[in-house]
Amino acid sequence: MPKINGNEIRPGNVLEHNGALWSAVKVDHVKPGKGGAFAQVEMRNLRNGSKLNERFRSADKVERVRLEQKDQQFLYESDGMLVFMDSETYEQIELPAELLGDRRPFLQDGMTIIVEFYESEALNATLPQKVTCRVVETEPVVKGQTAANSFKPAILDNGVKVMVPPFVGQDEDIIVNTETMEYSERA
């Protein structure tokens, strides 16, 4: 595995540190008045989700891990576990539902997502950036309400509440950005 300097760490990098796999969440480069510069790195453990703040000087060497990404198709959920199938080998894997966090409602039957593997262990799952959802409940359009940035609340078919522009009505399909959890465009 390639070793990188402490000042080369970027958010999203996966590192092997203290015998565990960590994902760099936030990286701040600090140059104090006295002493050498360092990178203050907030990391999340990929196996148990715990967080760690660590300082890396530029002379420190860290193992950078490359995760293998595979497309997996979502089949079903049972007992808090999400079951996915590899579309090439038809092998099935299970991942805990809390891995997706508050983006879990956007996972739809048959959806293809990217699962990241380290050797043969599934560690992380990423939803597509844009997902189509149906508006189940929203306020009716008020005539003359054309203020530049006026948004109204809407409830989607998966139970998530988002803010939508005034022209979006009930039973319309919209596209939601799963990273920001916000309205993107009409479907």
Image (cartoon, rainbow, N blue to C red):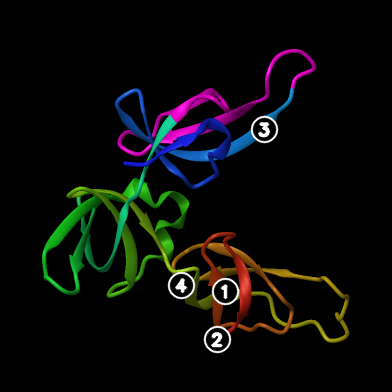
**Residue at the image point whose x is 20% and y is 48% from the top:** 119
The secondary element bearing badge 3 is classed as strand
Badge 2 crowding class, 10 Å Cα cut-off, few under 14, some 14 to 19, many 20 or more, is few
Instruction: For marks 2 and 1, give the one nearer the viewer.
Output: 2
Circle 4/circle 3 CB separation < 8 Å: no
Q: CA distance from mark 2 to mark 1?
A: 17 Å
Nearest to the observer: residue 77 or residue 115: 115
Q: CA distance from mark 4 to mark 3?
A: 43 Å
Under mark 2, the amino acid is: Ala
Badge 4 crowding class, 10 Å Cα cut-off, few under 14, some 14 to 19, many 20 or more, is some
The secondary element bearing badge 4 is classed as loop
Q: Verify whether residue 43 appears in magenta.
A: yes
Circle 1/circle 3 CB separation < 8 Å: no
The secondary element bearing badge 1 is classed as strand
Instruction: For marks 4 and 2, give the one nearer the viewer.
Output: 2
Circle 2/circle 1 CB separation < 8 Å: no
Span colored in magenta: 32-61
Badge 3 crowding class, 10 Å Cα cut-off, few under 14, some 14 to 19, many 20 or more, is some
Residue 21: mark: none
Query: Residue 94: x, y in percent?
Result: 19, 53
Query: Residue 28: x, y in percent?
Result: 65, 34
Q: Verify whether residue 14 appears in magenta.
A: no
Q: Quadrant of the N terminus?
A: top left
Q: Is residue 149 left or right of residue 17?
A: right
2 or 3: tag closer to the N-terminus? 3
Under mark 1, the amino acid is: Glu
Residue 137: mark: 1
Q: Which residue is mark 4?
A: 157
- The relative height of residue 157 versus residue 171 in the rendered view (above or below) is above
- The relative height of residue 96 versus residue 171 in the rendered view (above or below) is above
Q: Which residue is mark 3?
A: 29
